[in-house]
Amino acid sequence: MKPDTSPAIGTQEEARWVEDELVRSLVRTARSWQYLGLLMAVVVVGLLWDDAPHWLLATWTISTVLVSAARIRLLQCYARLPAAQQAQFFAQWRFLWPLSAFVGGLATGLFFDRAPLADQFICWLFMAGMAMFSINSLASHLATMRGYLNALALTALASMLWRIGVELRFGGPFYHYWVMGLLVVFWVALLQAGRRLHMTHRTNFELQYRNIQLIDTLTAQTQAALDAVAIKNRFLASAAHDIRQPVHALGLYADWLRSEPDLVGEIAPKIVESTKAVNALFDSLFDLARLDSGKIRLRLEPVDLPKLLHDLELQYRPLAQARGLSLRMHLAPGTALSDPILLQRIVGNLIANALKYTEQGGVLVASRSSQAACRIEIWDTGVGIAPAYQRDIFREFYKVPSHRGTEEGFGLGLSIVQRLTHILGHPLTLASRPGRGSVFRLLLLPTDAGEAARRAAATVAQLVNMP
């Protein structure tokens, strides 16, 4: 690669980021030499006080101070601007660096062939120092560096030509031309060195940008892997939570059949229904996995509420009897437009939750019809939920402190309920009194397929962004 050829920039975004960082690098280094022009003014005035007209020294000094003050003010304003506006602001005001070089170059007209050689030598050293220091300070932004060096060298050459050609009419000593030649060589050398140093800065920032992009990509891929693991863990925990109940019911029916073989005609249909419930739950769990990955398709159809609740009664009555609780159904005719599998999961989780936290009495499941929409209510005589915990119980893996029964399970039931009711558009409300019981009311507003898909996508996005 040639030194004066910029490496290929991958994208406009990369080019913009690199340019912004080059400007920021210039500003950071410029702060360390913004007072150098003032120091040069003091030195030049001290050396040339007896050799140059005082009014010229005063004019040049005031100009130097004003330009230096403007550059200092520019850096202060730049630091206070938002990052997005800094590059544009600098582009508007970077002419202050060539302007300061122009004023500095005018000092040549004050000392060249006017002051003693020793004083001239010191002034040349200061100007060479300013030019070389500008390489380190301004090379990160090539246009600014070139503008500064060109203004400084051209102004110095113009001042020397004025002295040699106009004032001395080319009658001065021959070494004047050698000095001009050396100045040109020094100027070209500085431009070449500055270009190479600029390429080093640019390459470093390009590599830095690509490293950042690589780190971001690896971070995103790592996060995606962690999200996949989290979704898998949620799926497994949800599966364990939901399959436990129908399998438990099957076990109770099997024990009952073993102890009462004469009741096979009564128990066998219930075992069949519980087996169907297990299969349906497997289907719904895989639907939930697809929901977590954003691939589920809701199956909306009119749901016969008495039949749905009757199926759930067969599934949960053995558990209620095993706990010495009553499970009563109050079924009013009615249908709701919803996804039957997901609706069954919602109501099943609410019934299981009610039975879990009820020690005496029982659970009432009621379906009610109205002109607006059908409603399902789950009443229990359990421990109740204090107002302070009524919002938290819908969080994943949350368990109410000091509640009996929380030592079992994963704290997923109500979290699943909240997600599914949100997606289906079925508002769920809770009323509870500690020590007296709770009631969950599910309003079965008709599910709109488009809105449900939008809410499902939002739920997936929220899951992916969960810490």
Image: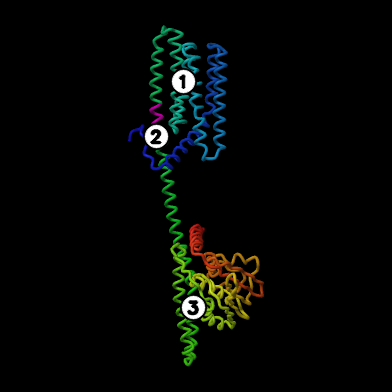
Which quarter of the figure is the N terminus placed in? Answer: top left
Give the x, y percent position of residue 352: 55, 75
**Mark before the other along the chain sequence, 2 or 3:** 2
**Which label lies toward us, 2 or 1?**
2
Is residue 167 or residue 442 the one in the foreground? 442
Residue 412 sits above or below residue 109 on the image: below
Cα distance between the residues tagged 3 and 1: 93 Å
The rendered magenta stretch, by its main secondary structure, is classed as: helix
Instruction: Check disc 3 and give the amino acid type.
Output: Pro
Q: Quadrant of residue 286?
A: bottom left
Observer-nearest of 314 and 76: 314
Q: What element carries label 2?
A: helix
The tag on residue 246 is: 3
Crowding around mark 2 (Cα neighbors within 10 Å: few <14, some 14 to 19, many 20+) is many
The mark found on residue 199 in the picture is: 2
Task: Name the residue: 57% across, 33% down.
Answer: 76
Query: What mark, if any, has residue 304 been given in the picture?
Result: none
Residue 334: % across, % down: 55, 76
Q: Dot 1: within a 10 Å radius of its alpha carbon, few (fewer than 14), some, or many (20 or more) residues?
A: few
Measuring from the top left, give residue 330's x and y in whole percent.
59, 80
Q: Residue 125 carries which label?
A: 1
Q: What stretch is highlighted in magenta?
A: 191-195
Q: Do the residues labelled 2 and 3 touch (CB within 8 Å)?
A: no
C-alpha separation, residue under disc 2 versus residue under disc 3: 71 Å
